[in-house]
């Protein structure tokens, strides 16, 4: 397995150790993570092709907030807090829709698609009221290669384009901008802390132990590396036929993809963007997956596949087989992270040593300790530590 760690100083005695177990279950730590990790981070909502028409909107809910992305009459994409400025009601319900105006269902306040407040019933009963200053609250938005991201707080951190700059040439051949959804977003609740999902996603050591299917497909070609804001994982399909039917048929039926270079025809590529958005890039499709905290020991995995138009029977079969293969991988990973979450509750476990090959986990732990210094403590501090 190839590993590489970039831009990473190893002068901290904790660099070779995991985060302490208490940080994976403590409510106070979770509350701090929401403010210091998730509020300033970019989160993927959908693809531009999901909101092609004027009035099309999509929502994303996380850390107690609901964000709506909508295409305006000028065809520009904007993001707003899905909160009416009157009494705080949600303005829209559900994951997606289309509307000429955004009308709050509580008191029928009306917002234009650019967020301006344009209608207030019985407006004369609000003395000295300035509609112009009570539009929907804007949220930072960025479109990167067709994918739409939002950010609740601007802490001066990098854009998605800046985060992915080291890999732009690598991603370009996949034509992200032309992708369209294959199916709908799947929401998978997990009874684990969000960090356990990410730790497992970027971990290469468990592949030959816990994922026999991926081992049959990749052999020893699986590699991992860590940049400041992005982890990369990769593997190349072997020519030797797998003993598993789904894997063997995928190897056999995956057709050539004209727009991909020769070295990508049978290459699987993964990126994890800080702190918990992942792109799984295959010759046949591109998936995004993100894991969002719902509690100290629970999270929600949100994922969907995107594809380029291709009516070939072999491609349709390859996409189905890809789903079968990764459904098994997901089941194996769910067992693993559940075992880890349960084990972290033991009084016998605090921190664990990290291999030099666990470059992504080393980098992630370092960043969490930078943002929340209390994560350097092996034992849970007294309640109220975050207020001091």
Image (cartoon, rainbow, N blue to C red):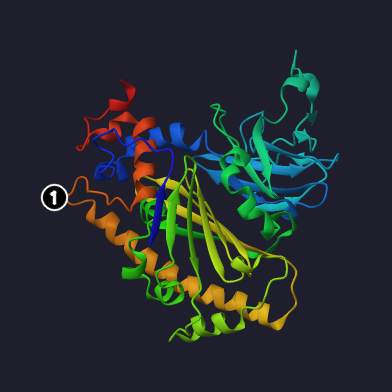
Quarter residue 149 falls in: top right
Q: Which residue carries the number 1 mark?
A: 348
Taking depth in this image into account, of 294 and 354 the one nearest to the observer is 354
Quarter residue 186 falls in: bottom right
Dividing the image into 4 quarters, which one contains the C terminus?
Answer: top left
Quarter residue 244 falls in: bottom left
- Residue 232, percent from left and from top: 49, 53
- Residue 243, percent from left and from top: 43, 87
Q: Is residue 59 left or right of residue 56?
A: left
What secondary structure is found at the residue carrying circle 1? Answer: loop
Dividing the image into 4 quarters, which one contains the N terminus?
Answer: bottom left
Query: Which residue is located at x 39 percent, y 38 percent?
Result: 8
Numbered disc total: 1
The answer to whether residue 240 is seen in the rendering is: yes
Where 198 sits versus 11, above or below?
below
- Residue 279, percent from left and from top: 56, 56
- Residue placed furthest toward the left: 348
Taking depth in this image into account, of 175 and 182 the one nearest to the observer is 175
Query: Which residue is located at x 57 percent, y 28 percent?
Result: 154
Query: Which residue is located at x 41 percent, y 73 percent?
Result: 219
Query: Which residue is located at x 32 percent, y 26 percent?
Result: 386
Taking depth in this image into account, of 327 and 93 the one nearest to the observer is 327
The answer to whether residue 94 is seen in the rendering is: no
- Residue placed furthest toward the right: 74
Q: Is residue 65 left or right of residue 120?
A: left
């Amino acid at each position: 397995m190839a590993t590489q760690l970039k831009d990473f100083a190893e002068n901290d005695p904790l660099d070779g150790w995991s985060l302490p177990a208490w940080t994976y279950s403590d409510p106070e730590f979770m509350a701090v993570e929401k403010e210091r990790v998730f509020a300033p981070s970019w989160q993927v909502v959908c693809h531009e092709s999901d909101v092609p028409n004027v009035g099309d909107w999509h929502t994303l809910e996380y850390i107690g907030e609901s964000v709506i992305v909508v295409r305006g009459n000028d065809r520009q994409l904007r993001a707003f807090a899905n909160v009416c400025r009157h009494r705080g009601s949600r303005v829209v319900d559900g994951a997606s829709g289309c509307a000429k105006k955004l009308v709050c269902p509580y008191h029928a306040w009306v917002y234009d698609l650019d967020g301006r407040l344009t209608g207030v019933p019985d407006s004369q009963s609000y003395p000295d009221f300035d509609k112009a200053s009570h539009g929907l609250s804007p949220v930072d938005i960025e479109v990167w290669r067709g994918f739409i991201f939002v950010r609740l707080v601007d802490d001066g951190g990098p854009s998605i384009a800046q985060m992915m700059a080291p890999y732009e040439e690598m991603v370009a051949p996949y034509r992200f901008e032309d992708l369209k959804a294959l199916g709908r977003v799947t929401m998978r609740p997990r009874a684990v802390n969000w960090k356990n999902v990410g730790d497992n996603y970027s971990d290469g050591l468990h592949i030959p132990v816990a994922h026999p299917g991926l081992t049959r497909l990749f052999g020893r070609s699986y590699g991992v590396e860590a940049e400041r804001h992005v982890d990369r994982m990769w593997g190349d399909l072997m020519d030797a036929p797998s003993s598993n039917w789904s894997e063997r048929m995928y190897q056999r039926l995956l057709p050539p993809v004209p727009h991909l270079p020769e070295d990508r025809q049978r290459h699987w590529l993964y990126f994890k963007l800080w702190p918990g958005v992942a792109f799984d890039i295959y010759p046949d499709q591109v998936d995004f997956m993100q894991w969002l905290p719902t509690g100290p020991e629970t999270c929600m995995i949100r994922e969907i596949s995107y594809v380029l138009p291709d009516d070939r029977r072999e491609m349709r079969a390859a996409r189905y087989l890809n789903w079968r293969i990764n459904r098994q991988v997901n089941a194996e990973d769910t067992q693993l992270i559940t075992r880890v979450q349960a084990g972290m509750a033991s009084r016998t476990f605090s921190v664990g040593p990290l291999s030099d090959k666990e470059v992504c986990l080393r980098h992630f732990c370092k960043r969490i300790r930078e943002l929340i210094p209390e994560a350097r403590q092996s034992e849970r501090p007294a309640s109220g530590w975050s207020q001091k």
